[in-house]
Image (tube, rainbow, N blue to C red):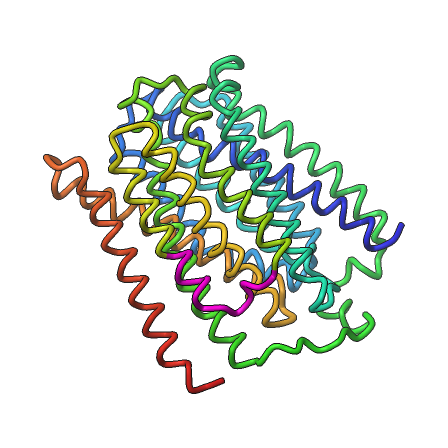
Amino acid sequence: MSYRKLKIGYFALEALNSLATSYYFFYLFFFMATEYGFTNRDNLAMAALNGFVYMLNAWLGGRFGQRYGYFSALSLGVGVMAASLAVGAFLHNQWGHIVVMVVCTLGMCFTWPNLEALVSERESPHELPRTLGLYNMVWAGAGALAFFAGGALLESLGPRSLFWLPVGIQLSQLLLLAWLSKKLKFTVLVPPDQALSHAPRLPLNPRPIARAKTFLQMAWVANPFAYIAVNTVVAVVPGIAKSFDLTPTLAGVFCSVWFFGRLATFLALWLWDGWHYRFRWFISAYLLLVAGFAALLLGSKLSTIIVAQVAFGMGLGLIYYSSLFYSMDAGEAKAEHGGLHESAIGAGIFGGPAIAGSALYLYPASPQSGTVAVAAVLMIGFLSLLVMRYRSRGSY
């Protein structure tokens, strides 16, 4: 089997990982609200804890894969997630479920950085953007499907499906990993830095190295701010659904618009590469993200929220794509760079809910205080990007 055909298997692993993790982590907020009466503030605190754990450990998961092999890291990560969720299926205690979430997050830290590295490995500078575009569309498409159908699944299969359905998917991942490892044989299973020394030398990337480093730094700054917005939105979706009297099924349909907006943006950016190393596109996407976030959480009409979700998804799409592309484009230690990219995401997952939850705690009489606080922080990110751009203009 050729290396190209094996990558189809890697994309299948990615899709399964996105389905399992998206269903569990997105609908955990509904589960905790229904089973234990969690409010927006409680869910934001839980989301902040999740992000804090991921921020600290995703980079380590990437380094582990860089040293011991991507498949070893993936098998460990998927196994830990499956074991933790299997335990969660039998728990009936809110603190127990929080521990399960933390352990599952630790396992996830070993998956995404190494999946990113697997699909990027041995790609030429010409092929890398297309490969990463496929990677983005696969995980985003699977995540959109999980959120869109997740509410209906939760209602029809019962709340415990939050655990046993991802476990079933993860067991299939482990079987696929075992099959792919046999196909790869020992020469590919050695640590990636050693394997690369025997790989054919790829042509050098023609982009200016100073420009590449600058955009990588800006992307690593912007992506956490983007995920500050994302995870504030995800944590309060049960509250949005309640305000419009939406069932979990309808909430999954209505609140998944931005997922599909992000997916459509990934497709457009995959087909057109004119956005590479273009600051105007990058900063415009960031402003679109901020505007969409504010309108989404402050809007009082369903039509306004739908339009806001489209804008939000488009802005997020380019920012995320930029972070991953520049991370993979800037060096050979792909799993480690992937880990840094994921740690930056973790910082956003932690920061958004922590800021919004703290504002709600300090100003409980103002239900919009969390949204205003997060929007203010997002504008700080905007100013930071302008400063970075200004300081770097003389270096390339």
Q: Position of residue 310 (x, y in %)?
A: 43, 40
Relative to 71, 311 lies left or right: left
**Of residues 118 and 267, which is closer to you in this image?**
267
Residue sticking out furthest to the right: 1
**Of residues 243 and 163, which is closer to you in this image?**
243
Magenta span covers which residues? 273-286
Relative to 263, 370 lies left or right: left
Reply above or below: 39 against 270.
above
Q: Position of residue 19 (x, y in %)?
A: 58, 34
Relative to 246, 1 lies left or right: right
Q: Position of residue 386 (x, y in %)?
A: 33, 70
Residue sticking out furthest to the bottom: 394
Residue 348 lies in the magenta-colored region: no
Question: Where is residue 127, by image quadrant?
Answer: bottom right
Give the tally of numbered discs.
Answer: 0
Q: Position of residue 113 (x, y in %)?
A: 58, 55
**Of residues 69 and 376, which is closer to you in this image?**
376
Residue 277 lies in the magenta-colored region: yes
Relative to 299, 168 lies left or right: right
What residue is at 29 percent from the left and 66 percent from the top?
A: 383
What residue is at 61 percent from the left and 45 percent from the top?
A: 137
What residue is at 33 percent from the left and 44 percent from the top?
A: 293
Question: Where is residue 394, by image quadrant?
Answer: bottom left
What residue is at 18 percent from the left and 45 percent from the top?
A: 359
